[in-house]
Amino acid sequence: MTTSQFVLDHSTSGRPRSAITSDDHAGVAVLNVYGDLDQATEPRFVQSVDCAMSASPSVLIIDLSDTRFLGCAGMAALLMAKEKAQANGIGYAVAAVGPTTARPMHELGLSTEIAIYPTVAGALRATREATPKDPPTPPLAEAGGTR
């Protein structure tokens, strides 16, 4: 497994408030988003997605389990990443659960556009079983966020 980190935003203490790490799981790229994904961090997120896709993974999974804020610009970037992945023949899924990430995506209807799973393991399992003609679709019970 290969890991790299992209720092998005520094606090005044010099420690990153938001960051993205990239892991390679046997040809599946997993981008872990820590902190906020919003208008301020969206440009670096897009760069991270482009960098991950340049390695031609079979699947790109965005892990939002450590994301503490997901803004409108972040959700738009997730949808654009899915469209880029599809255009390049790369599978795509998002791991998100709870009121910070999964609930707003479900309430805005993104769960009809993006396969959302509560864990990276669930997304990995589903995307490995999917085919280009039958993309991953999470079961509704598994994809729902807590209220």
Image (spheres, rainbow, N blue to C red):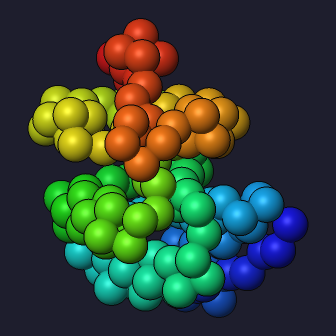
Tell me where residue 8 appears, x and y as whole percent: 50, 83
At a point 58% along the width and 62% down the height, the residue shown is 58
At a point 26% along the width and 64% down the height, the residue shown is 83
Q: Is residue 100 above or below residue 15?
A: above
Name the one closer to the observer, 107 or 94.
94
Q: Is residue 145 above or below residue 105?
A: above
Tell me where residue 128 appears, x and y as whole percent: 63, 41
Residue farthest toward the front in the current orientation of the protein: 133
Q: Is residue 100 above or below residue 42?
A: above
Q: Is residue 98 above or below residue 13?
A: above
Query: Residue 70's quadrant in the figure?
Result: bottom left
Residue farthest toward the top in the current orientation of the protein: 141
Tell me where residue 30 appears, x and y as whole percent: 62, 60
Can residue 77 be seen by looking at this rendering? Answer: no
Query: Residue 99's quadrant in the figure?
Result: top left
Name the one closer to the observer, 72 or 48.
48
Residue farthest toward the left in the current orientation of the protein: 108
Quarter of the figure that contains the C terminus: top left
Can residue 89 be seen by looking at this rendering? Answer: yes
Quarter of the figure that contains the N terminus: bottom right
Tell me where residue 110 appears, x and y as whole percent: 21, 41
Residue farthest toward the right in the current orientation of the protein: 1
Residue 104 falls left or right of residue 108: right
At a point 51% along the width and 78% down the height, the residue shown is 53
Query: Residue 27's quadrant in the figure?
Result: bottom right
Numbered circles on residues, count: 0
Name the one closer to the observer, 129 or 40.
129
Residue 136 falls left or right of residue 109: right
